[in-house]
Amino acid sequence: MNFMSDQDTFSHEQRWVIVSLILGAIMPLIDATALGVAIPNLAKSFEVNISKLQWVSVLYTITATMTVTLCAWATRRLGAKRLWLTGLFVFTASSLIAAISPNINMLLLSRGLQGVGAGIIMTGMQTVLVLSVGKPLLKTAMATMAVPTVLAPIAGPVVAGLLLHIGDWRWIFYINIPIGLMAFYLAVIKLPDNQERTPSKFDVGGFLFLAPALTLLVLSLSSLSDISTLKENTWLTAAFSFTLGALLLCVFLLHARQVGEKSLIQITSFRSYSFRSSMILLLLSSTGFYAGMFGLPVLFIQELGRSEWIVSLWIGAQGVGALVSRSYLKKMCDRWGVGFTGIMGVLLSVVGTLPLLIPDLYNHCILTSLSLLIRGAGIGLSTLLAMSHAFHELTPQQTPDASVLSRIFTLLGASFGPAGIVILYSLKWQFSSLEWVISGLSLLALACIWPTLKLLKAERRTTTRTVSSA
């Protein structure tokens, strides 16, 4: 695949590649939100308590996180297309097993397998996209995929409610089967298979360091997600798990530097100034996005006493802002450059978040929606810019590892965000929980200016080198 293509639009084959990727991605995205609505129905069907059903989500998270660590090695060994097909097959087949599960143990097993498929799908998606459409069209392609992938989690509860109305929880898994089969068929006939496979020895040591490190980090922070039931031992367990996970992650980084190309995930991508800056921006913007998605509904309902219907409209406005801004990402980058587009994203995030500190704002639903719309637009620009520009200076051979690293930073942001909200929510000294949380979100949005300025600096360096060589 020629990464320096001058095409301005997608070819017929590239359009079908994007459709296949969208179909594959919406399955785990809808599944994750839809299943929460079906928990009471599951408890009644299997006659088990809610605490045991928590493992339906926990096992999924553990296996998905551990699978992410294997994807770079598996891509080099199997190729991006074969790995993507494997992920689709595993997720679709495990959905069928889940749908016909006669008992809770079979359901737990199927959810663990679903996590494996989801880990491959959500990580391999970026590699396939980069290798299929090339760097010039990557921002446009990711913006195109953003529309259904952002709407999918929002639609999840609605789809679940409809399926539970006409049937039971099994239909939440049955619906994945036709979607998965269509995505698999399109992938077989439309995805290019032009990646050179370089079989390498599996890095056992790296896996034993990285897999438990990420699992401990994600689970320790996820354990803080229920504000109403936090206890002292929960904080201690989370702190211990987080510390151990962070230490194991540091050990893995030392191990990766030592073994070089034999590492489970090659970290040579970090030598690129643009990649480093993009990953920092992705971590901060993802943390802000997931913090807002988790914390703002809780604050609006519990602290302000607003109805769930009004809150859903406010949060929906934030999602609309993200969708609208992402659709203009490529045009803005072409006109103003990557650096100034990133700065625009940061400014919109800050301008949209700071007004939420004004108590009287919430008496005007339209103004609140407008503020959240602007906030969503800024975060949408920042996250997609970071994800797409990360590959700007990388070679095709570095793409699988960069995709995995991008996914890891997103997972960490998705864990840091809600955990940070819980900590801020627990602070009652001098200020209300609302003021603490909104101030934290504002500072987080403002912190994104640091990696954005680094991207601007990297862009100016590239421009200077181009002019000099000309």
Image (cartoon, helix red, strand yellow):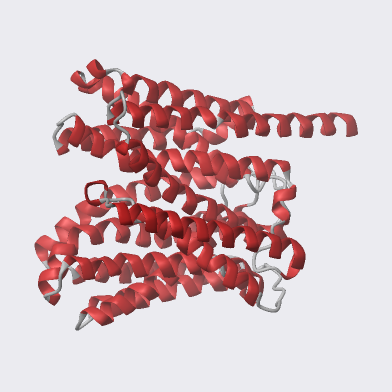
The residue nearer to you, when weighing 12 against 191, is: 191
- Relative to 448, say whether 418 is above or below: below
**Could you say where residue 150 lies in the image, as x and y percent from the top left?**
38, 46
Q: Is residue 470 left or right of residue 116?
A: right
Residue 321, compared with residue 14, is above or below; it is: above
Q: Position of residue 323 (x, y in %)?
A: 40, 37
Q: Where, by quadrant of the figure, is residue 170 drawn? A: bottom left
Of the 4 image quadrants, the one containing the N terminus is: bottom right
110 displayed left or right of 272:
left
Q: Taking 52 as reference, is 405 left or right?
A: right
Viewer-closest of 271 and 379: 271
Residue 343 can be seen, yes or no: yes
Q: Quadrant of the C terminus?
A: top right
Is residue 17 visible in the rendered image? The answer is no
Which residue is depicted at the point 22% across and 33% down? 300
Image vertical order of residue 355 relative to residue 307, above or below:
above
The percent position of residue 411, horizontal first and vertical second, equals 47, 54
Give whichever of 416, 189 is nearer the camera. Answer: 416
Residue 114 position, x and y percent, is 37, 71
* Total tally of numbered discs in the picture: 0
Residue furthest right as drawn? 469
**Residue drawn where x is 78% and y is 32% of the image:** 461
The residue that appears at 41% across and 36% down in the rendered structure is: 322
